[in-house]
Image (tube, rainbow, N blue to C red):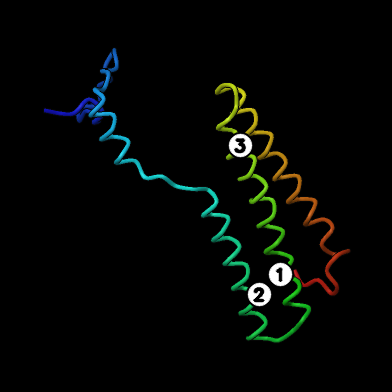
Amino acid sequence: MARPYDLEDDGAQASEPIPLTPEQAQTLRSRIAVFSPWRVVLVQGVVGALLVLVVWLTFGRSDWVGSVAYGGMAAWLPAALFVRGFVRQKNASGAGAALTGIFVWEFVKIVLTVALRLVAPKIVWDLNW
């Protein structure tokens, strides 16, 4: 017998959802992996730092190291800011407010990313794209 939360093989959609028992709901919750968006930000930062290290050890050119460091920061900072705003949306008053907040933070992330790219030639000495 199929559990209520399993997909049906024939592709037909049930007209009414079948409510889960507390035990079934707990089993379903335990099967869902919890994923933190901060893990993505951490990996982005580590990859950026490793790239800086590789460029420094391989080429030893300070202009290249500075360019890679700024590029990594210009990708990492907007992502970290977005995740901070995204995580705060779970405290929103409703689903609509949460969705609006996510869109606002995504817009902030895009604007900051573009702004960091535009000011890069003025900030990084001898920028190497």
Q: Position of residue 86 (x, y in %)?
A: 60, 39
Tell me which amino acid carries mark 1: Ala
Query: From the viewer's perspective, is the residue at label 2 or at label 3 nearer?
Result: 3
Disc 2 versus disc 3: distance between alpha carbons?
Answer: 31 Å
Identify the residue at horizontal 72%, vertical 58% (top origin).
74
Please say if 59 is above or below 121.
below
- Are the two marked residues, 3 and 1, in contact with CB atoms closer than 8 angstroms? no
Per the image, the residue denoted by label 2 is: 52
Q: Position of residue 111 (x, y in %)?
A: 76, 44
Tell me which amino acid carries mark 2: Val
Q: Who comes first in sequence, dot 3 or dot 1?
A: 1
Disc 1 versus disc 2: distance between alpha carbons?
Answer: 6 Å
Q: Mark number for residue 120?
A: none
Query: Under tag 2, what secondary structure?
Result: helix
- Are the two marked residues, 1 and 2, in contact with CB atoms closer than 8 angstroms? yes
The residue carrying pointer 1 sits among few (fewer than 14), some (14 to 19) or many (20 or more) residues within 10 Å by Cα, namely some
Q: Who comes first in sequence, dot 1 or dot 2?
A: 2
Per the image, the residue denoted by label 3 is: 88
Image quadrant in which you'd find residue 8: top left
Tell me which amino acid carries mark 3: Arg
The quarter of the image holding the N terminus is top left
Residue 24 versus residue 61: which sits nearer the camera? 24
Query: Is residue 99 toward the left or the right of residue 27 in the image?
Result: right
Q: Mark number for residue 69?
A: 1
Query: Is residue 114 toward the left or the right of residue 92 in the image?
Result: right
